[in-house]
Amino acid sequence: MVAGDQATPQAPPAAESEEEQQRIRKILEFCITPKSRQEIQAFIEIKDAKHFRLRILNPLIKGGLLKLTIPDKPTSPNQRYFS
């Protein structure tokens, strides 16, 4: 049963991975010029700000794919992100 349990969850992440990669490419292209969190979030049509920040924005920043215009103040309301 353990093998069956492992096989089932492996298929969806592979599909999500391809979708996530496309989403990341779109975000990086969109952010050639600095954009606010709200602009990026609206662009990829995600309404939940917390989910967007935790699952998309923060990993892109930590991975070095997105940079902050005000690195000393990451939570500034004037913060913009660029690739």
Image (cartoon, rainbow, N blue to C red):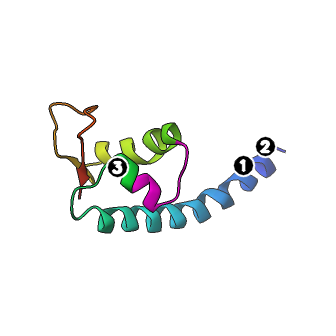
What residue is pinned by disc 3? 60
Q: Position of residue 69 (x, y in %)?
A: 16, 46
The one of 44 and 3 positioned closer to us in this rendering: 44
Describe residue 41's horizontal placement relative to residue 76 as left or right. right
Residues at marks 1 and 3, CA–CA distance in whole angstroms:
28 Å
The Cα atoms of the two marked residues, 1 and 2, are separated by 6 Å
Above or below 49: residue 23 = below
Q: For mark 3, does the 10 Å Cα neighbourhood hold few (<14), some (14 to 19), or many (20 or more) residues? A: some
Closer to the chain start, of discs 1 and 3, is: 1
* Labels in figure, total: 3
Residue visible at 36% across and 47% down in the picture: 37
* Tag 1 and tag 2, C-beta contact below 8 Å: yes
Callout 2 secondary element: helix
3D distance between C-alphas at marks 2 and 3:
33 Å
Q: Residue at x 77, y 49 (%)?
A: 3
The magenta-colored residue range is 40-48
Q: Which of 83 and 14 is in front in this view?
A: 83
Q: Which residue is drawn at 58% across and 60% down?
A: 16
**Who's the residue at 43% across and 61% down the image?**
43
Of the numbered discs 2 and 3, the one sitting upstream in the chain is: 2
Q: Read off the residue under disc 1.
A: 6
Identity, as a three-letter code, of the amino acid under mark 1: Gln
Type of the residue with mark 2: Val
Rendering quarter of residue 74: top left
Residue 30: where, in percent of width, then height?
32, 66
